[in-house]
Amino acid sequence: MATRINPSILAADFANLERELGRITTADLVHVDIMDNHFVPNLTFGLPMVERLQQVSPIPLDVHLMIDDPDRWAPGYAEAGAASVTFHAEAVNEPVALARHLRRIGARAGIALKPGTDAAPYLDLLPEFDQVLIMTVEPGFGGQSFIAETMPKLRRVSDAVAAAGLDVWLQVDGGITVDTIGLAAEAGADTFVAGSAVFRGVPGERIAELRAAVASHRHEPRRDPASLDG
């Protein structure tokens, strides 16, 4: 199983983003949080910033849309060249139609679930997505503490992916450090968003430490569909 470490530029130096991107070249993708001050109570970047980041980033962009009306706005981020575009289940009107549209443009399509959102309604839709993001904090702010109670949901999605034989990345975002990343790996995550844990220090060293922590906490998902009940 591949391990992907996606540093979040929400924890980077906003005045020197191109330099900050150059510090994380050993990462897999760079996580870009788009917040609109409506879906979440914070405001970050928009499409013009993503277009510029796409021009200078040495690694692909992993865009996470914490915004209202992603049905309207998400395609623009795919058209800008983002490798992955993830929208929230709680905000989208037509998740399957939007995912298919993003894929046609050429981006990986992801769906994100808040800590309190049940995964059950989306398990049958897993073939329509390239990534499922299980939020391990409430979306909207960086620096929050990891919510361990989200791990059973992650494990259930991981088992469903394995049972169906799908190639769907399982991402976690929020409070990911060398102390918590093992819990997420054991529950089935393979793609990890880390902000402060990467940028507060020497990023290359922090990324290597996170990879090592994942390697010692691998999860073997259940492949029996009957185990997904309950």
Image: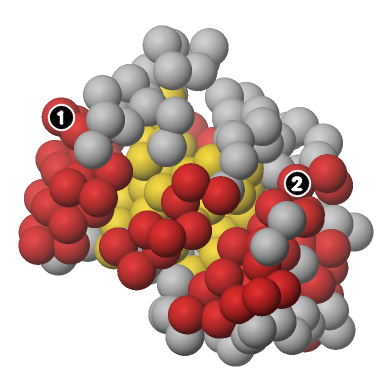
Q: What residue sits 42% from the left and 60% below the top?
A: 124
66 lies above or below 167: above
87 lies above or below 187: above
Could you tell me residue 180's position as x and y percent? 85, 57
Residue extending furthest toward the right: 179
Please state which amino acid type lies under the numbered disc 2: Thr
Q: Closer to the camera, 209 or 191?
A: 191
Please state which amino acid type lies under the numbered disc 1: Arg
Could you tell me residue 186's position as x and y percent? 80, 72
What kind of element bears circle 1? helix
Instruction: Please tell me the numbered disc located at residue 150.
Output: 2
Could you tell me residue 102's position as x and y percent? 18, 54
Q: Left or right: where does residue 137 sit relative to residue 10?
A: right
Residue at which label 1 appears: 72
- CA neighbours of label 1 inside 10 A, class few (<14), some (14 to 19), many (20+): few
What kind of element bears circle 2? helix
Q: Are marks 2 and 1 in contact (CB under 8 Å)?
A: no
